Amino acid sequence: MNEEHPFSLVVWRDSVCAGDDCDAPHESVLSVDANDSLRRVADRLLAGRYLASISGGNATWILRTESASGRPLAVFAQQWTQPRFLIDPDLLARSYIDPKAKPHLYLDYLCQIDPDIVFDCLLHKKPLPDKYGR
């Protein structure tokens, strides 16, 4: 990844329902400056309304590197105005990205699980609750 020029950042997100599957993997490509922080990338995702809104207003998402099993970076919640980061959000976004991966970032949908619980589990490396309540 060139450190002096903008680059394209590929983001995918989970589907939120069967009707949402027709557009999967919900790819978004952001032109990112080489000096943009992860916080700046997160702000752009929020400003672009990339995350699907859920009836009832309680959707929870985990921003990860590369895939649904990638390193967790932040928790987004429909009911929060800003994500909560698990890493230093002011570091360069490119420091978390494998330029050979596709996608570079992935948003894992956790249904309506309480985002505070999800954040606490990730922060303390505890198992996440089953997103389907099983």
Image: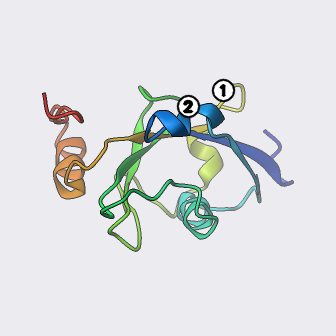
The residue located at (55%, 32%) in the rendering is 21
The residue located at (47%, 60%) in the rendering is 89
Find numbered disc 1 in the image and state the secondary structure of the residue it sits on: loop
Specify whether 99 is left or right of 39. Answer: right
In the rendered image, the quadrant that contains the C terminus is top left
The residue located at (83%, 54%) in the rendering is 6
* Residue contact at pointers 1 and 2, CB within 8 angstroms: yes
**Number of numbered discs present?**
2
Local crowd size for mark 2, using a 10 Å CA cut-off: few (<14), some (14–19), many (≥20): many
Residue type, label 2: Glu
Q: Disc 1 to disc 2, how far (Cα)?
A: 6 Å
- Seen in the picture, residue 29 relative to 100 is either above or below; the reply is below
Find numbered disc 2 in the image and state the secondary structure of the residue it sits on: loop
- Classify residue 22 by image quadrant: top right
Which of the labelled discs sits on residue 66, or is there none? 2
Local crowd size for mark 1, using a 10 Å CA cut-off: few (<14), some (14–19), many (≥20): few
Q: Which of disc 2 and disc 1 is earlier in sequence?
A: 2
Residue receiving disc 1: 101
The one of 52 and 29 positioned closer to us in this rendering:
52
Residue type, label 1: Ala
